Image: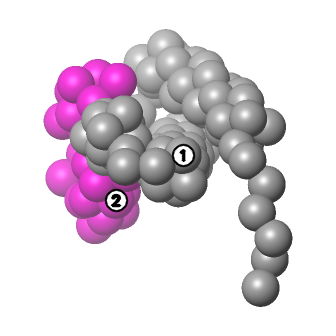
Amino acid sequence: FAVRVGKAIDTLPDTRLGRHIAGQLVRSGTSPAPNYAEACAAESKKDFIHKLAIVLKELRESSVWIRLIVKSELVPEKRLELLRDECDQLCKIIAKSLVTAKSTQPRTESK
């Protein structure tokens, strides 16, 4: 996903809006992979859930930027269709993983 995001960013026009979105998307679109790696190395179930939630947040942000690129007509929709679909699928996978992780997390008393 991160590699495809990078390639999509390179197709954006060198305009004020194009540069702004490129900067935002490069951050949100390349962070899920390393954040997922961090989640896999989590020190506890709570830490895993927290890090996985960050992955989902970054994917959702990427989805917004991808849709904004299309709505702003900076790149033809057809060129970003697969990237948008992949982002949506990753969101669903990570969201379901979070539900599963939370359902198997031991309950603790709140203070």
In front: mark 1 or mark 2?
Answer: 1
Q: Quadrant of residue 2?
A: top left
Q: Position of residue 27 (x, y in %)?
A: 29, 54
Q: Is residue 11 left or right of residue 100?
A: left
Q: Which residue is painted at 35% across and 24% down in the image?
A: 1
91 to 21, vertically: above or below: above
Q: Quadrant of residue 4?
A: top left
Q: Is residue 15 left or right of residue 62?
A: left
What is the number of the mark on residue 45? 1
Amino acid type at mark 2: Gln
11 to 58, vertically: above or below: above
Residue 50 among those drawn in magenta: no
Q: Which residues are magenta?
A: 1-28
Residue 52 showing in the rendered view: yes
- Most common secondary structure along the magenta stretch: helix
- Is label 2 in a helix, a strand or a loop? helix
